[in-house]
Amino acid sequence: MRETLLIPLALTFISFSLTSIGGGPSLFAPMQHEAVDVHHWITAREFVEMFAMSRAAPGPGSMLCALIGWKVDGWAGAIIATLALFVPSSLLCYAVARVWNSHRGKAWHTAVQEGLAPIGAGLILAGVLAIGRVAGAGPLWWGIAVLAAGILGLRPRLHPMVLLVIGGVAAVIAWKLSA
Amino acid sequence: MSQDVVTSPPSTSGARVGLPSIFIVFFKLGAFSFGGGLTGWVYQEVVAIRRWMSEEELLSGLALCQVLPGANVTNLSVFVGLKLRGIIGATVAVGALLTAPFLAVISFALIYDRIASLAWLSPAMDGISAAATGLLLVVGLKSSARAVGKLAPMLALAATAVMVGILQWPLLPVVLCVAPVSIWAAWPRKSRDA
């Protein structure tokens, strides 16, 4: 009787995949509603724990879907939920990007590219503010962010991982000192 | 290389990018990206370090990827992978990106009770996400510098950043309003060129 669990799981996440405009953060509220209230796959408490785990793990926050799937049916559930959430949107993006690339070099393509580039830059700056808000950022958090930005400004080709390690170590030291 | 299909233009560096290097770059991205600063890291790897794409190409792709449904970074991986090696490149990029995060959340679920007691884990995660955001900030400032001195791009950039970042208006309608104006301003005009 696994199909009775796995098919709704797949269908739920496929529909999320194709409607999640704005990426992962736009998904948390509907995911909670479907998984907790509609399908009773997990409890509200479990959802909060899973949210914390998915934030502590690397990668997109929407990987929360794997945890929900895991709870429903172990490895099969986790893999199905992950594929259902990431494959449909990737296929759509692939189709759009192919059309986009096939018109490279035409005058309108150049104009669209020039027109979209400053919007992409604006979205990156907006992303900085959004992450700060989600992280509940205090002075220490912003201090580390600005410090990392300063280091990268001085050494543009520095490897990102070096910066992340510096950030993690600095935060642990500050936490030790304040304890 | 000569075996390249005519329709797929060569990468900016001119050499064909190997699938293993695509896999390694995106696997690392997935494995070490905490707290959502992924876009900054993609920029750093793809434009600054490896020069697989021009800055403008990646930024316009980013705007495209954010408007489409799906996680921004998986869409961006599809975009970069497709540019480098077609559908195989896109599949390898997304697969590599998601492998480590998938295994990480499952491992967390398995050992949750044990790691929840590690008190230093949470500040460390916060610090990593802050540094990742610093990376994103540099990329945001660098890509904004391109718009300085040009009226229309500056307005488009500021309008997007304020409406989405500060006013927290939904992304899709904002982009759908700003994009046509911004593209119209960049549209080639015969009268001016002649």
Image (cartoon, coloured by chain):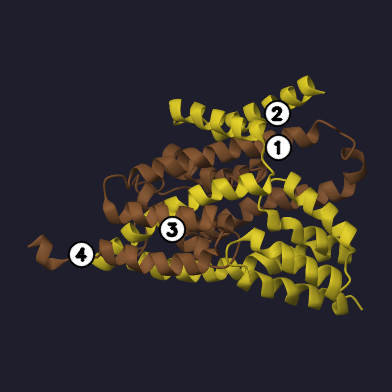
x, y percentage for residue B35? 66, 44
Looking at the rendered image, the disc whose residue lies closer to the viewer, 2 or 3, is 2
**Label 3: which residue?**
B61
Mark 4 is on which residue type? Pro
The residue at the far front in this view is B167
The answer to which of marks 4 and 1 sits earlier in the sequence is: 1
Q: Are marks 2 and 4 on the same chain?
A: no
Mark 1 is on which residue type? Asp
Q: Are marks 4 and 1 on the same chain?
A: yes
**Label 2: which residue?**
A171
x, y percentage for residue A73? 88, 66
The answer to which of marks 3 and 4 sits earlier in the sequence is: 3
Q: Give SS at disc 3.
A: helix
Mark 2 is on which residue type? Ala
**Dot 3 falls on which chain?**
B
The residue at the far left in this view is B194
Question: Toward which corner of the image does residue A16 lie, by quadrant?
Answer: bottom right
**Dot 1 falls on which chain?**
B
**Label 1: which residue?**
B126
Residue A158 in the image: above or below residue A135:
above
**Dot 2 falls on which chain?**
A
Q: In the image, what residue occupies the spot 79% across and 70% down?
A: A33
**Callout 2: 10 Å neighbours few (<14), some, many (20+)?**
many
**Label 4: which residue?**
B188
Q: Are marks 2 and 3 on the same chain?
A: no
Looking at the rendered image, the disc whose residue lies closer to the viewer, 1 or 3, is 1
In the picture, one chain is brown; tell me its letter.
B
